[in-house]
């Protein structure tokens, strides 16, 4: 758990290291525009057609697919994701990744991911 009270993970996404905030309330993995660019996407050329209802209101994202996300030796292939149409400080590791694990749990200040 970080000093902000949230869980953050370092992941390799299609061979590129990215930092995520773990968000069980996010349906999909959500990429910031900056992280999307690091992965080779051009945010200006994407179609922001996917609507999401968030605590901050309705936002739109551009659907994309990630070949693989690897965290600590756990690898998930062909992950549904979206590039957020608005500005974000970082990317979210949502349920399109987490639901493909056998499970995850919080033990004190540790988040345990199970392949």
Image (tube, rainbow, N blue to C red):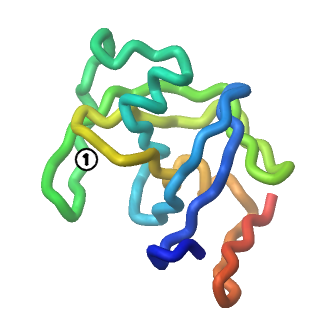
Task: Provide residue 87's location: percent of width, then percent of height.
Answer: 25, 39
Instruction: Indicate whether 42 appears above or below 81.
Output: above
78 left or right, relative to 102:
left
Q: Which residue is mark 1?
A: 52
Task: Provide residue 73's location: percent of width, then percent of height.
Answer: 86, 49
Q: Nearer the viewer, residue 71 or 96?
A: 71
Instruction: Indicate whether 25 appears above or below 110.
Output: above
Instruction: Report the residue that reaches farthest toward the left.
Output: 57
Q: Nearer the viewer, residue 50 or 31?
A: 31
20 left or right, relative to 51:
right
Tell me the residue at 31%/44% (across/down). Answer: 88
Instruction: Report the residue that reaches farthest toward the right.
Output: 73
Instruction: Indicate whether 68 appears above or below 45.
Output: below
Position of the C terminus, as image quadrant, is bottom right
Task: Provide residue 38's location: percent of width, then percent of height.
Answer: 53, 23
Q: How many numbered marks does the figure carry?
A: 1
Task: Provide residue 85's location: percent of width, then percent of height.
Answer: 25, 32
């Amino acid at each position: 758990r970080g000093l902000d009270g949230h869980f953050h993970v370092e992941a390799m996404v299609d061979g590129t290291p990215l930092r995520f905030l773990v968000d069980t309330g996010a349906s999909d993995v959500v990429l910031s525009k900056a992280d999307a660019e690091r992965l080779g996407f051009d945010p200006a050329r994407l179609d922001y057609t996917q609507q999401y209802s968030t605590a901050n209101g309705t936002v739109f994202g551009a659907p994309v697919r990630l070949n693989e996300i690897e965290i600590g030796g756990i690898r998930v292939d062909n992950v549904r994701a979206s590039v957020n149409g608005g500005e974000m400080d970082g990317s979210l590791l949502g349920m399109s990744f987490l639901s493909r694990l056998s499970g995850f749990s919080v033990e004190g200040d540790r988040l345990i991911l199970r392949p």
